Image (tube, grey):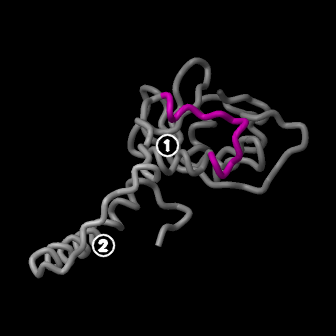
Amino acid sequence: CISPDDTAVTLREKMIPAGIENLLKAVDFVDAGNYTLVPQLEKQASLAPKLTKETGRIDWNKSALFLHNLVRGLLPWPCAYTHIRGKSLKLLKTEVSLYQKLGALPGEVIQINKEGIWVAAGRESLLIKEVHYESSKRMSGYSFSLGHEVTQGFRLG
């Protein structure tokens, strides 16, 4: 079961036991000759795009749900990121929030408290709970805001 907080890392850990179990079953079917080969339908086949660092660049015009899923899916690499004062800020843990501020521009900080930093997105807002700033260590969004003079009205990206 995939939870809203799962990332590529936590989902991988959840899938390992199921993968082992299914692999052992498949080996048993092959040993018993109990299988049928089915050719792949080329028209239904698709390739996943190659991940690059650019894949993780946050577009604040996208919905908060899209951005939250981007953050979750790109851990541990290449990570979703935005820019602040010319430096990269990786988003490590986020949450979708229904909180909106009328007139807020995409990427604008609309609220900060101990839970983190609320940023306006295309729809709703994204609560940034944990970050990794260039040449720094992993920290809470709130701690980052205190140490880097990020206040309400500041614009990310």
- Could you classify mark 1 by the number of other residues whose Cα lies within 10 Å: few (under 14), some (14-19), or many (20 or more)? some
Residues rendered magenta in the picture: 54-66
Q: Which residue is mark 1?
A: 139
Q: Which residue corresponds to the image point at 45% horizontal and 29% vertical from the top-left?
A: 53
Q: Is residue 58 magenta?
A: yes
Of residues 1 and 103, the one nearer the viewer is: 1
The label shown at residue 18 is: 2
- Amino acid carrying label 2: it is Ala
Of residues 39 and 103, the one nearer the viewer is: 39
- Could you classify mark 2 by the number of other residues whose Cα lies within 10 Å: few (under 14), some (14-19), or many (20 or more)? few
Q: Which residue corresponds to the image point at 42% horizontal and 53% vertical from the top-left?
A: 8
Q: Nearer the viewer, mark 1 or mark 2?
A: 2
The label shown at residue 157 is: none
- Amino acid carrying label 1: it is Met
Q: Residue furthest top?
A: 86
Going from N to C along the chain, the mark reached first, 1 or 2, is 2
Q: Is residue 46 left or right of residue 118?
A: left
Of residues 36 and 29, the one nearer the viewer is: 36
Q: Position of residue 136 (x, y in %)?
A: 43, 31
